[in-house]
Image (cartoon, rainbow, N blue to C red):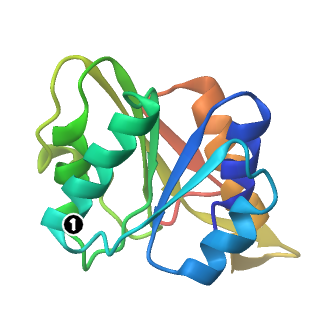
Amino acid sequence: MLAGTVLWLAEVGYHVSIIGRDAEKMSRLTEQVSARLSAVLVDYRDDLCLKEAMRRSIAIHGDFDLIVAWIHSDAADALPCVLSALRRGTDVFHVLGSRANSSGVRNRLTITEDVCYHQVQLGYQVVKGQRRWLTYEEIAGGVVEAIQEKKPLYLVGNETR
């Protein structure tokens, strides 16, 4: 769902390490901009494997400047693992689903002072008077806008609550 964001980050000069579980999807994405993308295949629900994968990525590419994290609810410890690996001023953009309570999510995290934590709350669109979910392109575009604006909380679409 964030392929457009990944490609934009590569286009503007970032080296992008993509953490994911699906080798086929990762391959399709890295083939598009292979020089700027690295696939980190790991089940991010496994804390030890995630920490080791991040350590290897940092050893190869250096510390992270920017993190875009959209983590499923079945991996509650993944973001704390990611946050614990950050060593210097890093912008973290945490993508939240439409039903997530942004302040509750933020309050459950331990974020050090040198990390700039941002939330990207997904909402919905209204088309011809009807609500609909955001498309992948709208989600990716909204995350790009959030990165560009660097607000503490950025809403993509309309608020669901």
Instruction: Judge by depth and name the residue closer to the eye, 50 or 145.
Output: 50
The structure residue drawn at horizontal position 37% and vertical position 65%, both measured from the top left corner, is: 71
The structure residue drawn at horizontal position 36% and vertical position 70%, both measured from the top left corner, is: 42
Q: How many marks?
A: 1
The structure residue drawn at horizontal position 75% and vertical position 49%, both measured from the top left corner, is: 7
User: Which element type, helix, strand or loop, lies under badge 1?
Assistant: helix
Q: Which residue lies furthest to the right in this view?
A: 128
Q: Name the residue under label 1.
A: 49
Query: Horizontal placement of 140 versus 116: left or right?
Result: right
Task: Mark yes or no: residue 135 visible.
Answer: no
| 138 shown above or below 91 | below
| 84 shown above or below 130 | above
Quadrant occupied by the C terminus = bottom left
Q: In which quarter of the image is residue 43?
A: bottom left
| 158 shown above or below 136 | above
Query: Could you tell me the amino acid type at mark 1?
Result: Cys
Expressed as whole percent of the image width and height from the top left, the position of residue 66 reads 47, 32
Expressed as whole percent of the image width and height from the top left, the position of residue 63 reads 37, 28
Task: Mark yes or no: residue 65 visible.
Answer: yes
Instruction: Judge by depth and name the residue closer to the eye, 32 or 119.
Output: 32
Q: How crowded is mark 1: few (under 14 residues within 10 Å), some or many (20 or more)?
A: some
The structure residue drawn at horizontal position 88% and vertical position 75%, both measured from the top left corner, is: 128
Quadrant occupied by the N terminus = bottom right
Expressed as whole percent of the image width and height from the top left, the position of residue 98 reads 47, 67
Q: In which quarter of the image is residue 145?
A: top right
Query: Horizontal placement of 23 versus 89: left or right?
Result: right
